[in-house]
Amino acid sequence: MSHETRSPDASRRRLVFAGAASVLATAFAPAVALAAAKTAASNAVGPYRLAALPYAESALAPAISAETVALHYGKHHRGYVDKLNGLLAGDSRRGKSLEELMRATHGTPADVAIFNNAAQIWNHDFYWRSLTPTGGGGAPSGALAKAIERDFGAFGALRAQLAEAANSQFGSGWAWLVVRDGKLAVQKTGDADNPMLSGARPLLTIDVWEHAYYVDYRNRRADYVTAVIDGLLDWRLAETELAHA
Ligand code: MN3
């Protein structure tokens, strides 16, 4: 069989499909117009954008593969952005910042989908910024190093607490280094929740949803967590956020 015998069939199928679509477009013009508007809202013209990844998709390998980043950033993270823009099409709240939206919808059952998608965008933006190409993040220094010594005793204790939080979060969620009431602390949150909603300021985060590690580590979350803490966390972000706390 050659392409010459296949392509006329394929062309005809496309024409038939186009014809059917045209008939549908005529019969349901308002619905089609609405769908088109929603599609536009969920793409570049919407108010919420997919932030650029701050490094190449392959930059976190081997701790996190390019395949994982392509899926995690390009499908999951992008999906939250598209979903939020769809949910807020025609909603007066679409002008709010992500943080304002999270605070306005947190704990409101009717707005749970808006909260979840807004918070997941914020959390993922922060997650990508919490990581840096292997070896680039250095070690805590300056005021951060002093605060770690003051509040944890030693870096090893912080490292152990962060790993414990990340590994013990039941189901989907996040592990965080935060500042709360002027002190550094480690905490975990479930699903899309974020420590800022209980009065803390995030300094670093680790995504422990299965989509963050299953391609590379299968069920071995602890191996992913170790690889991230020991190889990818960007302590410079924590220093910057602490300076603004
Ligand atoms: Mn994720």
Image (cartoon, rainbow, N blue to C red):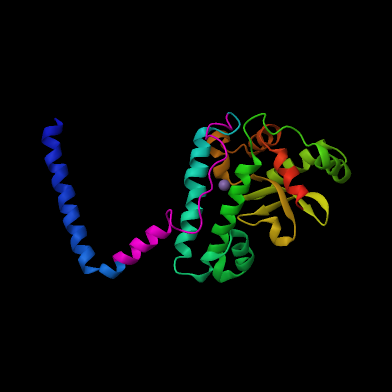
Q: Where is residue 239 drawn, in percent x and y? A: 75, 43
Q: Where is residue 245 drawn, in percent x and y? A: 77, 53
Q: Quadrant of residue 199?
A: bottom right
Q: Is residue 85 visible?
A: yes
What residue sits 42% from the left and 54% below the top? 43
Q: Is residue 171 visible?
A: no
Q: Nearer the viewer, residue 4 or 191?
A: 4
When the figure is inspected, residue 167 is found, relative to residue 23, above or below; the finding is: above
Q: Where is residue 117 drawn, in percent x and y? A: 54, 58
Q: Magenta includes 34?
A: yes
Q: Where is residue 106 drawn, in percent x and y? A: 63, 65
What residue sits 16% from the left and 57% below the top? 19
Is 106 on the left or on the right of 184, as rendered? left
Q: Nearer the viewer, residue 97 or 118?
A: 97
Q: Magenta includes 116?
A: no
Is 31 on the left or on the right of 183, as rendered? left
Is 126 on the left or on the right of 153, as rendered? left
Q: Which residues are magenta?
A: 32-61
